[in-house]
Amino acid sequence: MPSPALVEIRDLNFTYDRRPVLQGINMVFPKGKLVAIMGLSGCGKTTLLRHIGGALKPAKGYVKVDGQVVHELDRDNLYAMRRKMGMLFQFGALFTDMSVYDNVAFQMREHTGLPEAIIHDLVLMKLHAVGLRGTHHLMPSELSGGMARRVALARTVALDPMLIMYDEPFAGLDPISLTVVGDLIRRLNDALGATSIIVTHDVQESLKIVDYVYFMANGVIEAEGTPDEIRASDKEFVHQFVHGEMDGPVPFHYPGGDYRQDLNLRGGHHAGS
Amino acid sequence: MPAVKAIKGIGHRTVNAVWRIGVAARFFLLTLTHSGSGFRRFHLIIKELFSTGVMSLIIIIVAGLFVGMVLGLQGYETLKRYGSESALGSMVALSLVRELGPVVAALLFASRAGSAMTAEIGLMKATEQISAMEMMAVNPIARIVAPRFWAGVISMPLLAALFSAVGVFGGYFVGVVQIGVDEGSFWSQMQSAVDFREDILNGVIKSFAFGIVVTVIALFEGYDAPPTAEGVSGATTRTVVTSSLAILMLDFILTAIMFRGN
């Protein structure tokens, strides 16, 4: 029997500055699963994530999280919902005026009445889980990119969220950090019994860890399936994306005017000559 | 037609400016309504008092000392013409507590603390720290803006008072120690000329008003800055320029109200 859905998106439409960004999106994220949303930069992936987090309101359709329509929630209920969510931002978004320890302790201090002694132990456990217990006294500026991302991951799961969202978690990481972060995402999802959504364009790393994939292009879902189905897909777009080919339905050139006219050429000769 | 285009441009800018003032007013109201939770996190206000108030002490003390010394020199030269050198103390003190203390301290505060606030909040926005806070169900207005606002409002009158006090000592040093004005008349004339309500209290009210204006402008510009390097630098410049002009305009209005008919 398939898992019940934690997040359900139905006929989601969003327009920015009269430009349609999302058009009729339908997605389901079952409980306990790790689902990737892939696509080229600017295809609407992050916009979709912001709808799930309640940062944007749709023009049409809805996002339901744990049975509640997100955009219909008032501020208090939205904040109550967000306490059950975690989000890892593209470059970590660690608070630069706080130490690693205080970053991870931030939500515990804000949302729980836990005594400092218990917060201390919890923070060290979370940092230990991402392999960075020894960095608790450092400031974010003293961390490498990969370490900052792992600390941010520890902060994201500080309150054991039911839903974890990752916005480009692999961007700018070296190959070792990339594998470490990918492995952590999978293990944390399973250990916490959470549901995870990864927005990424890193195909190879994502296909290794996720349960299901949605491919987006120009605000619509182009393809979906399990990692094996995606690898075996004969759809031109998916094939080009997965194998990183230059030729295919995704053009290399940004649309522009006539090349010859731009170079001021007429009949193979420069108009001025 | 160029004329129509120019009129359109002026209209567009005017509408934008009015719109921005409205957004800033709404931001100010939100800051006030979320101040309750800001005060519950009093340690944050203390932390911000350090970075806005304590870290501005050096510039305020040095500037106050030199302004007082210049006042002492200029005042002595002018008063000597009328044979009133003994009134130097009252001249220095009145100039400082009524005008120069609140105004110059506020201008320095805008350049030093206001610009730092704008840059810090602008960068927090550019690096998604504010979005991260919102996603963690923590209101950034209550957690980031309100403590900084109150720290600015508390710091400003204290810094202005310190500026005036140091300035008086600067005037004393030049007038009494260096030039040789009678020490007794310097202090006694000052004591009899400076009125607590008319001069000192009005000066405190001015610096309190400047504190509100400068801090709100600095916080709003940072919070509203486009999340780019260019956006943050532009917002920081706007903070200094807008705050400085607002201080001078507000100073005229407050002076006109306070000292009308005196």
Image: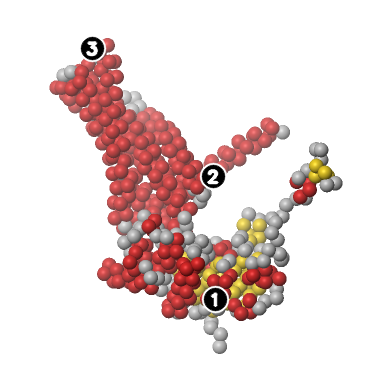
User: As shown in the figure, which amino acid type bears the numbered disc 3?
Assistant: Gly
> Does residue A74 appear left or right of residue B68 in this picture?
right
User: Could you classify mark 1 by the number of other residues whose Cα lies within 10 Å: few (under 14), some (14-19), or many (20 or more)?
Assistant: some
Instruction: Determine which residue is flagged by label 2.
Output: B19
User: As shown in the figure, which amino acid type bears the numbered disc 1?
Assistant: Lys
Cα gap from disc 2 to disc 1, whole angstroms: 50 Å
The numbered dot on residue A104 is: none
Badge 2 and badge 1 in a common chain: no
Instruction: Determine which residue is flagged by label 3.
Output: B83
Instruction: Determine which residue is flagged by label 1.
Output: A208
Secondary structure at numbered mark 2: helix
Q: Residue at x 43, y 46 (%)?
A: B119
A258, above or below B64, in the image: below
Among the two numbered marks 3 and 2 on one chain, the one whose residue lies closer to the N terminus: 2
Secondary structure at numbered mark 1: helix
Cα gap from disc 3 to disc 1, whole angstroms: 92 Å
**Contact, mark 2 vs mark 1 (Cβ under 8 Å):** no
Which of discs 3 and 2 lies nearer the camera? The answer is 3
In the displayed orientation, state which residue is furthest to the right.
A267
Q: Which chain letter matches label 3? A: B
Q: Percent x, y for residue B74?
A: 29, 19
Q: Residue at x 29, y 23 (%)?
A: B70
A96, above or below B166, in the image: below
Q: In terms of image quadrants, where is residue B193? A: top left
User: As shown in the figure, which amino acid type bears the numbered disc 2?
Assistant: Trp
